[in-house]
């Protein structure tokens, strides 16, 4: 039997049947034919290319495989993505950054061919069943749908902001960190205004784009609320896909970057503060509870959103006064553009009620933690 036929038979047996014995039968076929390995890998790269056509991106595949399967499957999908990458058209800096961030695809030494074949088939079964996603790119050209900034070098303002925030992360003095973060927030707000004004007067103004940000368990609802608050404060809109574990954020490129950085930073700060608050609760005789953590994160998201919106409004007003221009028409037109882009991508959305927010102590501690959170838009130091 040819190697191609072996792979075909294995796929017919396992990929279209969810029974465990079907998977074992197909794995046995592949394990018995070492010559089928190359063909099996080539078919995997084809599955990855098909996922790109259905709107998925490298970070999306890694996230869903990690969520649904295990470490070996994550290594395998990362290797397949790297195999497919040379055959893909250029897709912009954001895509390239996702390729650079792929986990190590080198597989550890495996004990038997049967187990490896079974893991590969489990991965392919998942890839085959991935639904189509809302495309983040403009048509078939591979250009980002808001790519006016793509490929431009980072400005001096952004470099200065990153340096300030790195110092804020590194210092052991809370007051110094707060001052550095506040200065960085001020510079970022001004930079956002500058970008809006430059785009408004450009021959071909930027258009809003979109990105996906993972919202991982546990307490996904509260985390999605936090991401929504960060997006709203930064002129973006977020739509949460609960089954697949991510939110799609729509906005202009500079604002999308701010949302990614700030959400990650606030989430790290929230989880650290929650751990400390829980320790204090246990010292007072109270056991660790799920409702405490859920209420903590919900309150944190609510309060952080209020702080962020107030800071953004104040900084925007100051920037407009300093530039002696009326920013309202510029910002209003960008808000309309973001809303229109969102409605094209998601013509139907629903709202959901946040569950499990019933712990008064958790709400109080979460609000207090948000009041002390640093709101600079930065990546945490390693």
Image: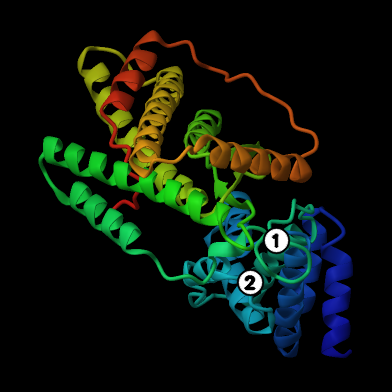
Q: Position of residue 293 (x, y in %)?
A: 41, 24
Q: Residue at x 75, y 39 (%)?
A: 343
- The residue lying furthest to the left in this view is 173
Q: Is residue 110 or residue 55 the one in the foreground?
A: 55
Q: According to the image, label 2 marks what residue?
A: 91
Q: Residues within 10 Å of mark 1 (few under 14, many from 20)?
A: some
Residue 7 to residue 369: above or below: below
Q: Position of residue 128 (x, y in %)?
A: 79, 61
Quadrant assignment for the C terminus: bottom left
| 81 sits to left or right of 311 | right
Q: Are marks 2 and 1 in contact (CB under 8 Å)?
A: yes
Q: Residue at x 82, y 79 (%)?
A: 7
| 322 sits to left or right of 23 | left
Quadrant assignment for the N terminus: bottom right
Residue 55 to residue 42: above or below: above
Distance from disc 2 to disc 1, alpha carbons, whole Å, reads: 9 Å
Q: Position of residue 16 (x, y in %)?
A: 87, 59
Q: Is residue 382 visible?
A: no
Q: Earlier in the sequence, mark 2 or mark 1?
A: 2
**Mark 2: secondary structure:** loop
Q: Residue at x 50, y 15 (%)?
A: 357
Q: Position of residue 378 (x, y in %)?
A: 34, 50
Q: According to the image, label 1 marks what residue?
A: 137
Q: Is residue 232 or residue 152 the one in the foreground?
A: 152
């Amino acid at each position: 039997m040819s190697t191609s036929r072996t792979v075909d038979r294995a796929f017919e047996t396992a990929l279209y049947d969810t029974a465990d014995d079907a998977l074992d039968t197909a794995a046995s076929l592949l394990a018995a034919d070492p010559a089928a390995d190359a063909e099996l890998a080539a078919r995997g790269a084809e599955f990855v290319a098909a996922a790109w056509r259905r709107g998925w991106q490298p970070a999306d595949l890694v996230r869903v495989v990690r969520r649904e399967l295990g470490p070996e499957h994550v290594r395998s999908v990362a290797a397949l993505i790297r195999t497919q990458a040379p055959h893909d058209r250029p897709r912009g800096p954001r895509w390239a950054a996702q390729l650079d961030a792929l986990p190590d695809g080198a597989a550890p030494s495996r004990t038997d061919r049967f187990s490896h074949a079974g893991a590969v088939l489990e991965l392919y079964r998942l890839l085959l069943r991935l639904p189509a996603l809302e495309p983040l790119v403009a048509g078939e050209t591979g250009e980002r749908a808001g790519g006016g900034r793509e490929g431009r070098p980072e400005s001096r303002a952004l470099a200065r902001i990153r340096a300030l925030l790195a110092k804020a992360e590194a210092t052991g003095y809370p007051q110094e960190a707060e001052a550095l973060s506040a200065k960085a927030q001020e510079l970022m707000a001004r930079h956002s205004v500058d970008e809006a004004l430059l785009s408004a007067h450009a021959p071909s103004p930027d258009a809003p784009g979109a990105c996906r940000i993972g919202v991982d368990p546990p307490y996904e609802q509260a985390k999605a609320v936090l991401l929504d608050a960060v997006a709203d404060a930064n002129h973006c809109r977020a739509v949460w896909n609960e089954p697949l574990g991510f939110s799609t954020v729509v906005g202009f490129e500079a604002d999308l970057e701010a949302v990614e950085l700030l959400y990650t930073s606030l989430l790290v700060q929230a989880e650290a503060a929650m751990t400390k608050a829980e320790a204090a609760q246990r010292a007072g005789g109270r056991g660790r509870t799920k409702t405490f953590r859920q209420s903590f994160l919900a309150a944190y998201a609510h309060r952080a959103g209020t702080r962020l919106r107030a800071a953004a409004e104040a900084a925007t007003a100051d920037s407009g006064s300093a530039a002696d221009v009326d920013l309202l028409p510029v910002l209003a037109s960008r808000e309309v553009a973001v809303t229109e882009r969102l409605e094209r991508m998601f013509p139907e959305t629903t709202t959901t009620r946040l569950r499990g927010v019933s712990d008064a102590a958790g709400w109080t501690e979460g609000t207090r933690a948000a009041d002390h959170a640093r709101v600079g838009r930065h990546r945490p130091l390693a």
